[in-house]
Amino acid sequence: MHISHGHNHIRRALLLGSAGLAGLAAVGRPAHALPAKTLTFPRDRGAHPDFKTEWWYITGRCVSGAREFGFQLTFFRSRVDSTQGMASKFAAKQLLFAHAAITDVQGKKLWHDQRIARDGFGVATSSQSDMAIKLRDWSLQADGKRYTAELPTADFGLTLQFTETQGVLLQGKNGLSRKGPDDKQASYYYSQPQLASTGSLRVQGKTFEVTGSAWLDHEWSQELLAPGVVGWDWIGMNLLDGSALTAFRLRDKDGGAVWDGGSFRSSANSLYVFSKGEVIFKPTRFWKSPLTQTTYPVEWMVRTPADFYTVKAVIDNQELDSRQSTGSIYWEGLSELIDSNGKKVGSGYLEMTGYSKPLQL
């Protein structure tokens, strides 16, 4: 379902939702500072339809023999404020959007597809009691400490199971994550790193039985991006020793950081939440997309309180061009994490938005 030009606010919400800091977007009503609250599970794994934007996001690395793959799936919910008072069952009060991608490392190719529908009529649903999301023939659901994802497409498919190996990681201050200089710019945000992954990937008619590790993020919010923000850079990395690293920055038009943050949880379960100014992203190598002519940093030096890391894309071309639906162009893909001694210590996903054109809210 293509979003018409008349729904630009939804298109912008979907742009933010398909990417790793999606919960920042909101339009249509004044935002207020989110109160501190205790996240409870499994309820907070489910949907929060009173909030403007929400997303469930799983990324990971997996192998099948000598073949290596990256995978990403996102389910995003957007509340349409202008229709909330309508009595008709056909009113689009909630929109659900989903995106799936596979990076074939040896084949040096990215496969991606997407779905969109209004909530209701059994076509698109999102439970409020636990993680259970359906969008046409795509689904993501939780059962205790296990998650199951089914995302078939014409060219590829994901059938994956994820099992928790660690406790939930509450981002920010006990799950309340600041995203800007104003305390209204915040979201409820938790992660589930180091998910053990099994299942199958289908690429070009071939099915690969795979195993690996994955990362889940779930975030919901009411707030706009801070003034002057044109995009962001974000990483979620599973380290080989069981640690987990999150780091992000929101950029202005000159490439400066309007806000930054993240966290590091060690394999011994000690958590350090980064304060503003403790994370620095410095690009060290660039790649220009032949399709969109957009230039992206595909290698970074990322300074955090945990270490100085190099983040390196496994293949350069992991750009997602969604101009035919959400209007967005961004880069999101499997990357390696290398420590200050030059040793590969983990892998995960790097996401970069706002390089093709600034986000406009």
Image (spheres, helix red, strand yellow):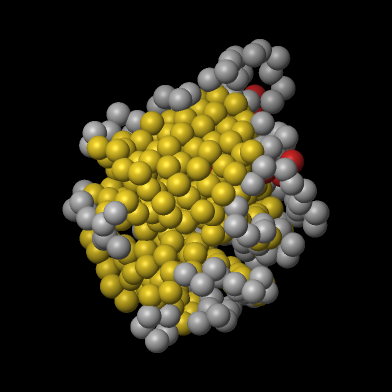
When the figure is inspected, residue 138 is found, relative to residue 208, above or below; the finding is above
- Residue at the image position 67 percent from the left and 59 percent from the top: 167
The x and y percentages for residue 247 are 53, 68
Left/right placement of residue 164 relative to residue 5 reads: right
Between residue 221 and residue 223, name the one nearer to us.
221
The x and y percentages for residue 138 are 47, 30
Q: Can residue 9 be seen at all in this image of the molecule?
A: no
Left/right placement of residue 140 relative to residue 294 reads: right
Between residue 318 and residue 107, name the one nearer to us.
107
Residue 267 quadrant = bottom right
- Residue at the image position 46 percent from the left and 34 percent from the top: 150
Left/right placement of residue 121 relative to residue 74 reads: right
Residue that protrudes farthest toward the bottom in the picture: 341
Between residue 283 and residue 80, name the one nearer to us.
283
Q: How many marks?
A: 0
The x and y percentages for residue 48 are 70, 38
Between residue 180 and residue 208, name the one nearer to us.
208
- Residue at the image position 51 percent from the left and 28 percent from the top: 135
Q: Can residue 61 be seen at all in this image of the molecule?
A: yes
| Quadrant of the snapshot with the N terminus | top left
When the figure is inspected, residue 208 is found, relative to residue 303, above or below; the finding is above
The x and y percentages for residue 178 are 66, 62
- Residue at the image position 57 percent from the left and 18 percent from the top: 122
When the figure is inspected, residue 262 is found, relative to residue 109, above or below; the finding is below
